Image (spheres, rainbow, N blue to C red):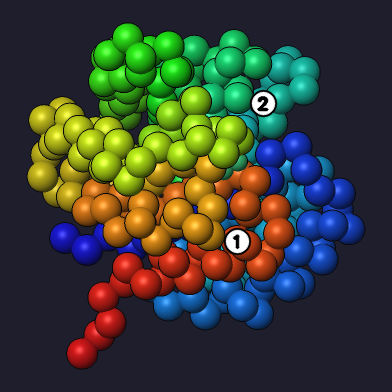
Amino acid sequence: MARRPMMAANWKMNKTIREAEEYMAALLPRAADAEGVDVAVFAPFTCLHEVARMAEDTPIIAGAQNFYYEDSGAFTGEVSVPMLQDAGARAGIVGHSERRENFCEDDDMVARKAARAVEAELLPVVCVGETKEERDAGDMWEKVSGQVRRVMEELDDPDGGSLVFAYEPIWAIGTGETATPEDAQDAIGQMRGLLRELRDDDFADGVRILYGGSVEPENAAEIMAQEDVDGALVGGASLEVESFMQLVEAAQETVPSEQ
Ligand code: PEP
């Protein structure tokens, strides 16, 4: 089954409102007609509304980098799924390793956030991945499969289009050290196999699984060419429109042209 590739920009804690506007003004005319590829921009809360407003009536998906699973209440500093949707977000990153490591998000919290997003039809991009120590100890699959299983346990009858997974080996994020295309395929292929076992063929064949970790214009084509890799979640190389567009174009290369 052909899955629609996704190229997703994670700006992390970067960009003022003015910088976000400038970026979107440059991105929109170039990315809005990116045939066959979903282009998403995950912006900080402070500029999300502006990014979403500019992306309105275009295919570009505005998304948040985090949210909480409760809808409202005494959760100082948190932002809920309905609040994101009110700001125009259509997607949200869940369980990025920087949140798991720096803000103590565990598998239970990540699973609850993913479930709340699916329920509200906010597309979650659920991140999983192992540390360098875990990989070196041969524990990559134990870690990644545990993270995937916990998310799937929490979901109530999802279909493959209702969420996206991102395999992001922690040792490759922001380090310039990319997984080899074979490593990315190996982990993502195993994830798809697990999802087939946990749910069914329709789900496993329909759900998109991205790779993330130092994706750059130089290595994107090789990674995107892997059978089970459906796109990329990109930090550093997404901060400039020029390099992000090169990644969008690399994703477009993988889309079969209509005869
Ligand atoms: C990320 O932010 O998810 C990421 C993969 O960052 P980078 O591309 O900078 O490694």
The part of the image, by quadrant, that contains residue 221 is bottom left
Q: Is residue 121 at least partly visible in the picture?
A: no
Left or right, 14 with respect to 69, comes to right
Q: How many marks?
A: 2
Residue at 20% from the left image edge and 33% from the top image edge: 190
Image quadrant containing the N terminus: bottom left
Left or right, 228 with respect to 18, comes to left
Residue 106 position within the rendered picture, expressed as x and y whole percent measured from the top left = 49, 12
Circle 1 packing at 10 Å, graded few (<14), some (14-19), many (20+), is many
> In this picture, is 9 found above or below 175?
below
Which is closer to the viewer, label 2 or label 1?
A: 1
The part of the image, by quadrant, that contains residue 22 is bottom right
Q: Which numbered circle lies on residue 244?
A: 1
Q: Earlier in the sequence, mark 2 or mark 1?
A: 2
Residue at 89% from the left image edge and 58% from the top image edge: 18
Q: Which numbered circle lies on residue 72?
A: 2
Q: Is residue 246 at least partly visible in the picture?
A: yes
Q: Residue furthest bottom?
A: 259
> In this picture, is 112 found above or below 245?
above
Q: Nearer the viewer, residue 213 or 51?
A: 213
Question: Which quadrant of the figure shows ligand 1?
Answer: top right
Residue 188 position within the rendered picture, expressed as x and y whole percent measured from the top left = 27, 38
Residue 192 position within the rendered picture, expressed as x and y whole percent measured from the top left = 21, 38
Circle 2 packing at 10 Å, graded few (<14), some (14-19), many (20+), is few
Circle 1 sits in a helix, a strand or a loop, which is it? Answer: helix
Q: Callout 2, which amino acid?
A: Ser
Q: Callout 1, which amino acid?
A: Phe
Q: Nearer the viewer, residue 90 or 207?
A: 207
Residue at 50% from the left image edge and 66% from the top image edge: 248
Kindly tell me whether mark 1's CB lies below 8 Å from ligand 1: no
